[in-house]
Amino acid sequence: MPFNYLGTMRENQYRFLRNFLLRERQAVSARLRYINSELSKLGRVTVIYEQQTTQVQTPEGAVTDIQTVTERRQGIIISAGSSLEKLVQAYIAMGGNPNNVSMFLTPDDLQFASDLDPDEDPEVNPNQINTDIGVPDNPFDQPGGGIVGVESTDSYGPGGLYRGGRPNFIRDPYTKIGRYIDLGDTNAKIAIKMDYARRWATQEIKELSLLESRILKLADLREQLIQERDELIQQAVGGSVPDYPNPNDPDRYSQALNLTNIVTEMDRVFYVTDENGNPNFEAINSGTGDNPTGISLYDTLFPNDPGEDPFVTL
C-alpha cells in the first residue's frame, strides 16, 4: 500500500509523501468539478415537517412559546431528474412508503427565521437560553434540530422508565410502553402470525429493501461529497490553491492542520533550514549531542541509512 506510514518514517519516506501531496494540489480544480457534477446528478431529498407552537419553562420560572416541529411529515421534495428521484419513484411504484426510508435530517442546513444571521441580527438576544426543543429566535425546522440522538438526563418518566439514554424520537417502543420488557417474549404470539402473513412475499420485501439501501447510499454519498468539498479539502489546502484562495477561518478550521503549515513544520524537523525557512534537502537536521534538534527529538523519525535503497518508501 502506498504511503502506509504515519508517525514512524525515514527521511525519504517523508520526502516522497511530501512531494506527492504538494503536487496533488494541481488536481484540486478537476476534483472539485467532479464533486459538483456528481452532486448535481445525485440530487437531494428535502422533508417538510409539521410546525407547532410549544410552551416551555424558562430558568426564571416563566413560560415562553417556542416554534418547533413534530416528526409528522407534510411533504417530500426531491431534485427533479436526479438519481434519487428515479430510485424513489421506483420504490413507490413497487409499493414502498418513502417515509419509511429515512427522516433525511440535515443538521448542517439551517434556515434562519429572519433575513439576517442571528449573530448579526440586532433583534436577536444573544443571551437567550437554548432549550431541548429549540432556540426562541431561531426555531428548528427539523425534529431535534436535525439530529437523532439519546436523551441526557437523570430523571424518570411515566412508569419509572429511566429517561437517560433513551432515543429522542417518539417511535421508541420502550418509551411508548413506559418500562423495559423483553419484547421477544411479549410479542411472540403476534410475531408468529406476522411471520406467516409475510412469508409468501419475502422476495418482494427483499427487493424493496435493496432499493431502500440504494436510496440511503446515495443520500450518504451526497453527504460525504459535501463534507469532502467543504471541510476536508478546505482544511487541507485553503489559502494555497485558486479554488480555495482565502485562508481558512481560524474559528472553524485548525491552522496547524493545514497542509502548508504541516509541511513547513515537518521540513524544519527533517531538514536544516536557512534564515527564510527554506529547507536544504541535502542536510538532515539531526542536531548534535550538545544541541539535539530536528529528528533527534523524535524516536520514530530516522535518517536514511547508507545501505538502504533511497527510492523505497515501504
Image (cartoon, grey):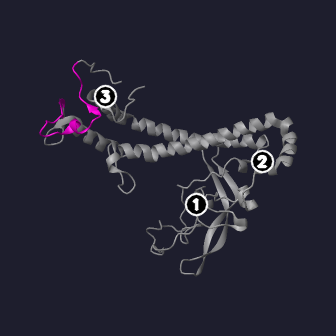
Question: Which residue type carries mark 1?
Answer: Gly
Q: Is residue 206 left or right of residue 65?
A: right
SS assignment for the magenta stretch, majority: loop
> What's the distance in space between the residues labelled 2 and 1, CA to CA?
33 Å
Q: In this picture, is 274 found above or below 140? A: above
Q: In this picture, is 287 found above or below 72? A: above
Residue placed under numbered mark 3 in the picture: 13
Residue placed under numbered mark 2 in the picture: 184
Q: Residues within 10 Å of mark 1 (few under 14, many from 20)?
A: many
Q: Position of residue 25 (x, y in %)?
A: 36, 36
Residue at the location (44% across, 47% down)?
231
Question: Which residue type carries mark 2?
Answer: Gly
User: Which comes sooner in the sequence, label 2 or label 3?
Assistant: 3
Determine contact: label 2, label 3, CB under 8 Å: no
Q: Which residues are magenta?
A: 281-306
Q: On residue 145, which mark appears?
A: 1
> What's the distance in space between the residues labelled 2 and 3, CA to CA?
56 Å
Tell me, yes or no, whether the highlighted magenta stretch contains residue 81: no
Element marked by disc 2: helix
Question: Which residue type carries mark 3?
Answer: Gln
Q: Residues within 10 Å of mark 2 (few under 14, many from 20)?
A: few
Q: Position of residue 75 (x, y in %)?
A: 70, 56
